[in-house]
Amino acid sequence: MAVLERLWRSLAARARPTGGVMPPTRKSQTRDLGIHTPPLPARVTLLLEDGRDQPWREVQPIVRPGQYVRAGEPVARAVGHLALPVHASISGHVSALCMHDESAPDGQHRPAVVIDADGASQHQWLPALDWQAALPDEIIQRIADAGIAGMGGGGFPAHLKIRAARQASIDTLVVNAAECEPYLSVDDQTLRRYADRVLSGAAMVARATGAAAIVIGIEDDKPEAASAVRDRLGELPCPARLEVIPTRYPSGGERQLIERLLGRRLSTGQLPVDAGVLCHNPGTLAAIHDAVALGKPMIERTLTLAGRALDRPGNVSARLGTTIEHLLIDAGLDRARLSRVIEGGPMMGQAISSLSQPITQTTNGLIAATETELPPPPRARPCIRCGDCQPACPAGLAPQQLWWHAQAGEDQKAEANGLFDCIECGACDYVCPSHLPLASGFGEAKQRLRTARAESARADQARHRFEARQAREQREAAEREARRQARRQAAARRGQQRDATSGSKETSAAAPDVRGLRIAQAAAKAAARKAEKALERAAQQQESADVLADLETQLSIAREHLAAADARLKTARQEETRS
Amino acid sequence: MSHLHRHTNADGTDRGHDSATLMRRVTLACLPGLLAQSWFFGLGVVTNVITAAACCLLIEAMMLAARRRPVSPTIADGSALLTGVLLGAALPAGTSLWLILIGSLAAVAVAKHLYGVLGQNLFNPAMVGYALLLVSFPTQMSLWPAPSGLFGPDAVEPSTWLARWLGQHPPAALDALSGATPLDAFRHRNADADAALLLAPGAMEAWQSVALAWLGGGLYLLHRRLIDWRLPLSMLVSMALLAWLFELLSASGGVGFHLLGGAAIFGAFFIVTDPVSAASGRRARLVYGAGIGALTMIIRAYGGYPDAVAFAVLLMNLAAPLLDQLVPDRPPRQPAAMVSSDDD
Amino acid sequence: MTHSDARDIAIKGLWSNNPALVQLLGLCPLLAVTGSVVNGLGLGLATLGVMLGASASASVLRHQVRPEVRLPAFVLIIAAFVTCVELAMAALAYELYQVLGIFLPLIVTNCAILARVEAFASRQPLAPALFDALMNGLGFALVLVLIGAIRELLGQGTLFAGMELLLGDPASDWTLYLPGDGGMLFLVLPPGAFLVTGLLIAAKNAIDDAVKRRRPAPTKTPGDERRVRVTGVVR
C-alpha cells in the first residue's frame, strides 16, 4: 500500500505543472536605459512607524526640529523588536517631526522626520568593516545598524533574517534575481552594472550565516545580467552556481523559487530557514555590501519608473524619502496622460492615492500608467466554475474552492484547503474571466483568521490571569489553614485537661487522605517544572513579549498550585500526627 | 489585486474569453448542428429553438424581477439564451408550445433560479428541462418526424404547422408522423431480427449527418479554447469503449453507430462542457466525462429510454462536487504548522 | 377551554402549525398516495379517525400511563385504532382499501399522530385534546386533498375520478375531464409529488409574508430587554 502511495506521489509530482501565468512583460520600456541619478530633492520625508498598530515596528526619533543632520546620520532608533533605525538620506536641517497626510486614517499627521536640504552633500558614514576578518555577529550587527530591510518588496529587517538563518544553520544562500513582475527591471540593471557589489554582499551574508553554497536564480529574459553574474562567479569564496529559469510569473516567489532551484518543498507555515535556505534580493545584498565595506547606511535605493505617461522612463537611484512626484516629474510625467500610479509591480502592487507620498525602502517600482495601459477591469461577475484559476496558481491551490469558502464566511474551511499557502501573487486574478478580485479576497480572509486568532489568544491570556488570581487565593487559604492547624495543635498540647473536661470539641473528621494529597503535590510540582521549561524554550526562540508574559502567568499559576498543595499536605500530616 | 487582466481590453471592456462572450460564442457554434437538423427534419426545429429561446428569456426576466435583481445585466450574459437554444435543439421537431414552456420553466426557474444565480446551479438546466419533459410526456417526446427535408410535409402547410405548435393534433395522426430513431432500433435489438427495417428510409444517414454537423460546431469550440477538451474526449472515449464491448457481446450497435447516433456528439460538446454543472478540477473532469459516457451506454443498452445522455448528465452532475474532492489535481495538502504572523 | 384557546388551536392545526406543510410530518403517505383526490381523501379521513381516537384515549388515560413507557403505550393505542380503521375500510370501501395498500397500516408510523399525542393530547383534558386532534387531522387531510387535486388535475387531466370508491355509486359522475389527452406524467410520479408539495409550502410562506407585511410592525415596549449583568443586555 505504501509502495503504491509513493508511486502515485512521484507520478503526480512529475505531472504537476508549475503553475503561473505569462502576462506581457513590458520591460522594454526601461531595461536597457541604465541607472540614472535624479537631482537631489529639496526635502525628504522619512516615515516612522509609531507603533500604534504594530508595536513591534516602533521607532523613536532622536533629533529635534531645527537640528542639522548629515546624510547617513541616524535620526530614529529602533524600539520594537522588528524595527530598524532610520538614517537621514540627505544633509540639511530637520524641519518637522510629522507629515501632513490626507490619506491617514485618523488625524492627518503621520510621524516622520522631514529634512530640508541645504545643498551641501555632507555625509557621515560608519567606519568600514573588514568583513573577512570580522566575526559573523559583527557583520550582522553592522547590517542592523545600517537599517537594511528586504528590498524585494517584503521589508522584513535583513539582520533578523540573517540571524535566524545563522541559528538554524542554513546551508544555502539563494539570490532571488528572478524579477518576474512585469515592468520592473531594477534587479536586471543592478546586476548588469553592479554585479560585483551584489556578489560581494552575498559572500558577506554567506559568511555571516555559515552558508556553504550560493545559488543565483535569474529569469531567461535577462541574458546580459546573467552573463555579468556568470563572469564573476569565480570570485566568490564558496561554491556558487547560476540557474537560469524560464520566464513565468511568479517565478520569483520565495517558496516557488526554492522549490525550483533546490527541490525543497516548504509545507504550510514553514519558513525558508526551516529548509536550510536564506533568500535575498540583489538590491538588499548590494546595500549590505555598501554598509559593511563602505559603512554606508540605508539612505537610497534603485527603483524602476515606468509607464507610458512618462516621457523618460528608466531605472533611478533615489534617496529614501523623496516624494513620488519629484521622481516622476524628473522622468517626464505628463499629467494629461496619467490615469493612475501603481507602487510596485502591476500584479501585486497598490495604486497610490497621493503623489506627495515619499518612497520607502520597499518601493521597488512606480508605474505611471495611462488609461489604456492598465485599464480598470469591468464589474466582477459570478464565478462560472471554469477552473482556469487552478492551473494558474503557483502554490498548487484551488482558488475556486477558496473563493467559495471565503465568500460563504467559511474561513476555517478555506484554511484547511491551504489558504495560508497563498502568496497573493494575483495570477488567479489575471486569468479569471469573470474578473473576480480573488487575491484580495484571500488576503481579507487571512486577515480575518489572524484577527480571530489574536483575539482568542488575548482571551486566553485574560483567562490565565484570572486563574492566577484564583490560584493565589487558594494557596493563601491553604496556608492559613495550615497555620491555624499548627496553632490548634500547640493549644491542644498546652491545655490537655481542659480538652478532656469539655469533651472532644474537635470532632474528628474523616481521616486525612495524606496519600492522595502527596500525589496531588507531586503532580503540582511536575506541572510547575513543565511550565518553567515552556517559558525557557519560548525565551530562547525570542517569542514576542506578550507570549512570554502569558507563559510567565501560567508558571505563576503552577507555582501557586504547588504552594497550596504543599500547605494542604502539611496540614494533613499535622492532623495525622495528632490523631 | 492584480492590475493586469488577461480578459480586459485596453478600453476596460471584456476581451473575448469572459463569461458573456463565451456564452455568445457557444450559441453561435450551435448553428451548424441546427442548420443540419432543420435541413433534415423540417422547420419544426427552427420553431423549437425560437420558441424555447423566447420562453427561457421571458422566464428568466420574470424570475429576476420576482427576486428583485437587476434584469438586463443578467440577461445580457447570454446563459438563458443558450439554455433555450440547447433545449430547443434537443426536443423533437415541431414540439408544441406548452411543452416548450413547461420545459423552459423547469430549466430556468427550477434548475437555475431556485439554486441561486448563475454559477450555482447543481444541474445542467437544459437537461433538467429535457428530462422533465421526457418523463412527463413520453408520447409527445418520441414524435421524431421521419426525415423529410426542409420543405417536407411539416413545412408546406402553415396551418398544420401552427396546429402542431399549439399542441392540437389528433392522437391518431401521431403514428403517421413519428419515425423510429436509430436508437429506438438499438433498444429493440434483441426483440427484432432485423432492426433496421423499423427505420424510415434515410434516417440513419440523416442522423449521422446531423451528428457530424454538431461535431463541426464542437471542433470550433475546441479550436477557440472555449471548452475544456478533457470533457468531450473522456465522454466519447468511454462511450466508444463500451460500444465496442457491447458490439462484441450482442452483435449490434457498434462504435460509429453509438457515437454518431442520438445526442452523443451534441451532448459531448455542448452539454457536458457546461462549466457550472461539471466538475472543476482537471483530473476530476476526466472522470466526470468518462462517467457520463459509461452511464449513457449502460442506460442505452439496458435502461428504459432510447437515448440516455440527459439522464447520464444529470446523474454525474450530482457526483461532480464529490469528484472534485475525491480526485484532486495535486496531492493532498500536508498538515498545517503554526501560522507565520509576519509575511515577508 | 376558552374561545380564544379554541381559536388558537384551530389556526395552529389548520395553518400555522399544519402537520404537512409546516411540521413536515407524515410526508411518506403524503407523497405516495396523493395521486388523486379520492386517494388523498381516503387516507386523510383514515388519519383523522385514528388521530381522534388516539388523542381521546391518550387524554383519558394520561394519568394512568407512566412517563417512562408513554411512547410505546401511545404507539399501541394508535396501532389499535389503525387496525380498526383498516378493517372498517376493508369492509366499507374495499377497492379503495386495495388502492391504498400498505399506507393504511403505515398510519401507525405517521409521526404527525404520535407527535400530537405526545405533545398535546397526553397533557390536556379530553375536550381540548379532541379539538386539537380534529384540527390537526383536518389540516392534514385538507393538504392531502389539495395535493391530490393538483396532481390529478395536471397529471391525469381528471378531477374527482374514482370518487365512487369512497362515496358510493352516485359519486361516479362527479368526474371532470380536462380537454386534451392526459397531463404531465411527471406529476403522477413521486418526484412530481415532491415538487407540488414544495411549491405549496412556498405558496404558504409567500402568503404568510404578504400578510405580515400588510400588518403594522409590533412596537417594542420598554422593559422588553432583560438585564442579566451590568455589562450585557440579553435580547
Image: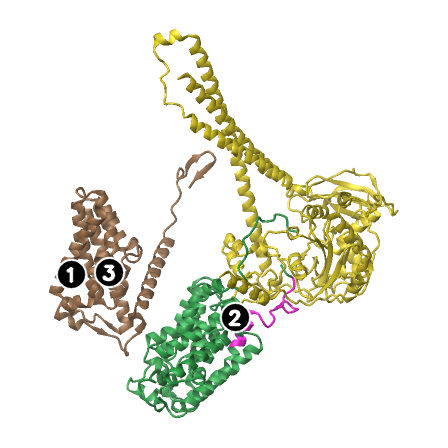
Chain colours: A yellow, B green, C brown
In-image side of B293 versus C100 (left or right): right
Report which residue position mark 1 lands on.
C86
Determine the CA span between mark 2 and mark 1.
59 Å
Distance between the Cα atoms at labels 1 and 3? 20 Å
Q: Amino acid at mark 1?
A: Glu
Is residue A44 left or right of B25 when viewed as pictured? right
- Disc 1 + disc 3, Cβ < 8 Å: no
Q: Are marks 2 and 3 in contact (CB under 8 Å)?
A: no
Mark 2 element type = helix
Q: Residue shown at 22%/67% (left/top)?
A: C37
Would you identify the image quadrant in which residue B159 lies?
bottom left
**Mark 1, other Cα within 10 Å: few <14 / some 14–19 / many ≥20:** some
Position of residue A485 relative to residue A36, above or below, is above
Q: Which residue in the rendered view is the most extreme toward the right?
A: A120
Looking at the rendered structure, which numbered label has been put on residue B76? 2
| Amino acid type, residue under disc 2 in the picture | Ala
Residue B251 magenta-drawn?
no
Earlier in the chain: of badge 1 and badge 3, it is 1
Residue C102 shows in this picture: yes
In the rendered view, does C109 fall on the left or right side of A218? Answer: left
Q: Residue furthest bottom?
A: B201
Q: Are marks 1 and 3 on the same chain?
A: yes
Q: Residue tagged by mark 3?
A: C142
Q: Which residues are magenta?
A: B3-26
Asked where in the image residue C44 lies, by quadrant, the reply is bottom left
Give the answer, above or below, for where A94 lies relative to A171.
Answer: above
